[in-house]
Image (spheres, grey):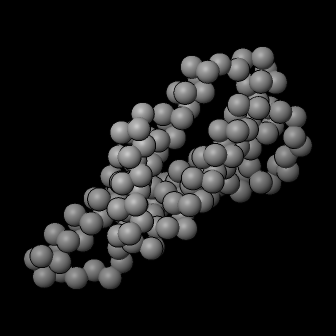
Amino acid sequence: MDKLKLLLSAALAGLLAYTRVILIPLALLIVMMSVDYISGISAAYIRGELSSKVGLKGIVKKVGYIGVVIVAAVMDWVLFSGLKGVGVDIEMSYYLGLIVTIWLIINECISVLENLGEIGVPLPPFLMKAITKLKKHLEDKGGNQDE
């Protein structure tokens, strides 16, 4: 477990040192992952389904999210460095990393709202609708980049 923590810390530190562009979205993702985990545990407790195995699976999944962000940021670096190497200079960087991070933040927001709804917290209908539309818009924009 200590080696996993060390590896994750080193990867995250390297990513954060490499760029400040993705720092705030990454911090927001970590906050939302924590809120989602806590709200998920609360919802499971209320349903009478609290399980350490399911909780551990949730933690592993959240660590995987950070891995996806790291892979996207590496792909950005490879793409932009490769293009720069052949004389194509693009000003925008961390496009994939930023899109992936924002997409994961939106997923976490949706999950938190679903968990809070299960707990019995009244939710304004427009909030879930707005977040769902934002997710769809982001997915549509990301999909159009392939064309």
Of residues 98 and 11, the one nearer the viewer is 11
Of residues 38 and 139, the one nearer the viewer is 38
Of residues 121 and 135, the one nearer the viewer is 121
Please tell me whether residue 52 is drawn above or below residue 129 in the rendered image.
Answer: above
Please tell me whether residue 61 is drawn above or below residue 142 in the rendered image.
Answer: above
Estimate the x, y position of residue 51 in percent, counting from the top left.
65, 19
Q: Please name the residue shown 80% across and 54% down the image.
A: 126
Estimate the x, y position of residue 47 in percent, counting from the top left.
79, 20
Q: Quadrant of residue 127?
A: bottom right
Can residue 96 be seen by looking at this rendering?
no
Estimate the x, y position of residue 112 in percent, counting from the top left.
70, 43
Q: Please name the residue shown 60% across and 59% down the image.
A: 28
Can residue 65 be seen by looking at this rendering?
yes
Quadrant the N terminus occupies: top left
For residue 143, side relative to residue 119 (left or right): left
Of residues 77 and 103, the one nearer the viewer is 77
